[in-house]
Amino acid sequence: MRQELVQEQKLQQKMNHSLLQAIQILQLSSIEMIEYIQSLANENPLIEDINFDYEISTYKEKYSSYNPIEEVTQQPMSMYDELKEQLVTIQVKKDIKEAVYFGIDSLDENGYLTIDLSMLANHCSISESDADEALRIIQSLDPAGIGARSLSECIIIQLKRMNKYHTYIEELLNQHLNLVANEDVSEIMDIYKVTETEAFETLENIKSCHPKPGTLINTKVPEYVIPEANVYKEEGSWKIDFYQWTSPAIRMNQDYQKFDQLNKETKMYLKEKQNQVEWLQGAIMYRTNTLESVIQLIVEKQFLFFEHGTFMLKPLTLKDLADVLNVHVSTISRTIRNKYIQTNYGTIPLKFFFQSGIKQSNGTETSAFTIKKLIEEIIAYEDKQKPFSDETIKRKLNEEFGIQVARRTVMKYREQLNIPSSMKRKNRGGNTL
């Protein structure tokens, strides 16, 4: 009886160890897993070879030679890379996407656009109105002032972003820049019929703007990201190719089994190392199967996002996937941790696809992300002299997009977006001459 109990306890310990290792491997990103496996290989004499198989069997040719391990020297992220990365969460129409990217590439090191709209339109074979829309998207990126074509436009963009723009400032900057340089408060008061306080505040606000916004972008060495899979459209269907490096094959050296003359202590050591390899192989297989199931389900649930972009992102919770896959919510949480997929919108973290939502009267749900983007768009096109109240934004969401939300929800999302109230957004400047 005692012997059976001891054996049962030993079996339980092995199961616990195996489970813990599986959980540990599951929550690692690909690069973390690769580093972990390589560290174990340095300590385990039975690991003869690790095959990461970088050649991707079914992925597009242009990515098949990509080898993340050989990419030892990480290059700093440039201003252009940083700006393009921001486009992942912005809805950009397909016919102007090339123009937006070309416009970003046409910025100088200070963030100013070096080409005019007609050149942008001609190069990308689009209308000037579409080129203007592409420029508006570029100028919506951070930091404020990016994409400006002159110093005055750079300052105006920043002031509008801070909700400190007054209608007379454009003329002040374009025709009376010397008044700004000399801080001539009295002359500004006289020309634009504003109070001393307003003139002084205008000068202070202008001085707070950065003349070279491009230099504000830190060129940093990014944390290296290796996508787990590529999601792409082929012949009208969405397909998923999982990179082979996410499921490395470990080959164990079998020669040790031939050494019958080994002493007991050495045999026990080798048996321990053999168990370590077998546990590791099982943990990798568990990670692979779980990750593939989760990504396939994400693509299925967020099908409209892959078709049409961020405005079609649906509400999705960890529990939604856990229920379908019959696993605990914590398993889904560990699976998506630090994991990315390659899409036609760029490399996106899996956690991006999990969004809270608001239920509509027709039974459908709209994601909070989509509602926030629409609120931003509504406010971007409002009359700055008569900004929309939260109640008006609520009505517009319903009338123009069929989205029903409470006024307090609009207020909450607006505040989360760091957008001031309509009262604070209102342009209190003097009259335009």
Image: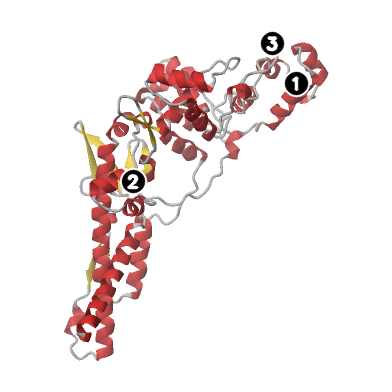
Q: Identify the residue position indicated by label 2 in the image.
A: 318
Question: In the image, what residue type sits under mark 3?
Answer: Asn
Q: Which mark is first along the chain, 3 or 1?
A: 1
Query: In this view of the protein, can residue 178 be seen by the observer?
Result: yes
User: The N terminus appears in which quarter of the rendering?
Assistant: bottom left
Q: Quadrant of residue 232?
A: top left
- Left or right: 176 as drawn, with respect to 405: right
Q: CA distance from mark 2 to mark 1?
A: 51 Å
Whole-percent x, y for residue 265 in the image: 28, 89
Q: Which mark is first along the chain, 1 or 2?
A: 1
Q: Identify the residue position indicated by label 1 in the image.
A: 198
Whole-percent x, y for residue 116 in the image: 51, 20
Query: In this view of the protein, can residue 116 be seen by the observer?
Result: no
Q: Identify the residue position indicated by label 3 in the image.
A: 431
Question: In the image, what residue type sits under mark 2?
Answer: Leu
**Dot 1 alpha-carbon crowd within 10 angstroms: few under 14, some 14 to 19, many 20 or more:** some
Whole-percent x, y for residue 124 in the image: 39, 22
Q: CA distance from mark 1 to mark 3?
A: 13 Å
Residue drawn at x 28%, y 68% is: 18
Residue drawn at x 22%, y 68% is: 251
**Dot 3 alpha-carbon crowd within 10 angstroms: few under 14, some 14 to 19, many 20 or more:** few
**Dot 2 alpha-carbon crowd within 10 angstroms: few under 14, some 14 to 19, many 20 or more:** some
Q: Secondary structure at mark 1?
A: helix
Question: In the image, what residue type sits under mark 1?
Answer: Glu
Whole-percent x, y for residue 150 in the image: 61, 23
Instruction: Say if 312 sits above or below 389 in the image.
Output: below
